[in-house]
Amino acid sequence: MPPKFYPTSGHILICQNNNCQGRGSALLYKALWNHLEREGLAYYKKGGKVRLTESGCLGACSYGPTLCVYRQTPQGLEEGWYAAVDFPVAKAVAQAVQDGSELPEAHKYGPEQQRS
């Protein structure tokens, strides 16, 4: 029997490399995991659409914890990269993924932010 498929709206990755862990990424991951569980946002909960995964380096080692999010939109694949992430920022990203709303701008980094 094949495994059950759980549809998602987006995938959040939180870096667990040494620099980010030294800045609290393990606690951030656990706090966000608990939030997704409590609020029913986790992809395996009824109505939940958010997938959360620990990851390796996301490239902003001196500014951790770092987080990235990928989601499919009508315009194509959207990604957001965040540095110096705290729980309120992570929670806002997760809620935007769940709701399909615009990703928050606070703590974003990458080429799109450099053009502004």
Image (tube, rainbow, N blue to C red):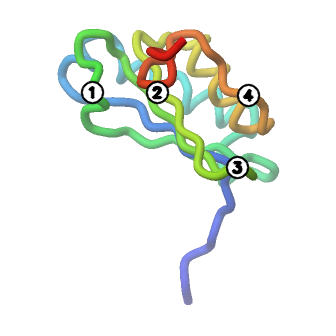
Badge 3 density bin: few <14, some 14–19, many ≥20, Cα 10 Å: few
**Callout 2, which amino acid?**
Trp
**Callout 1, which amino acid?**
Gly
Helix, strand or loop for disc 2? strand
Mark pair 1, 3: CA separation: 26 Å
Mark 4 or mark 3, earlier in chain: 3
**Horizontal side of residue 40 vs 23, given as left or right:** right
Mark 4 or mark 2, earlier in chain: 2
Q: For the view shown, which residue lies furthest in the front direction?
A: 115
Q: Residue at x 44, y 15 (%)?
A: 114
* Residue matched to label 4: 102
Above or below, 12 against 73 in this view is: above
x, y percent for residue 3: 55, 77
* Residue matched to label 1: 59
Q: Which residue is drawn at 59% across and 29% down?
A: 34
> Contact (CB < 8 A) between labels 4 and 1?
no
**Callout 4, which amino acid?**
Glu
x, y percent for residue 90: 56, 21
* Residue matched to label 2: 81
Q: Nearer the viewer, mark 4 or mark 3?
A: 3
Q: Which residue is drawn at 53% across and 31% down?
A: 80
**Callout 3, which amino acid?**
Gln
* Residue matched to label 3: 75
Mark pair 2, 1: CA separation: 10 Å
Residue in front for this viewpoint, 89 or 87: 89
Q: Quadrant of the C terminus?
A: top right
**Horizontal side of residue 69 vs 23, given as left or right:** right
Mark 1 or mark 3, earlier in chain: 1
Mark 2 or mark 3, earlier in chain: 3
> Contact (CB < 8 A) between labels 2 and 1?
yes
Residue 7 lies in what quarter of the image?
bottom right
Mark pair 4, 1: CA separation: 23 Å
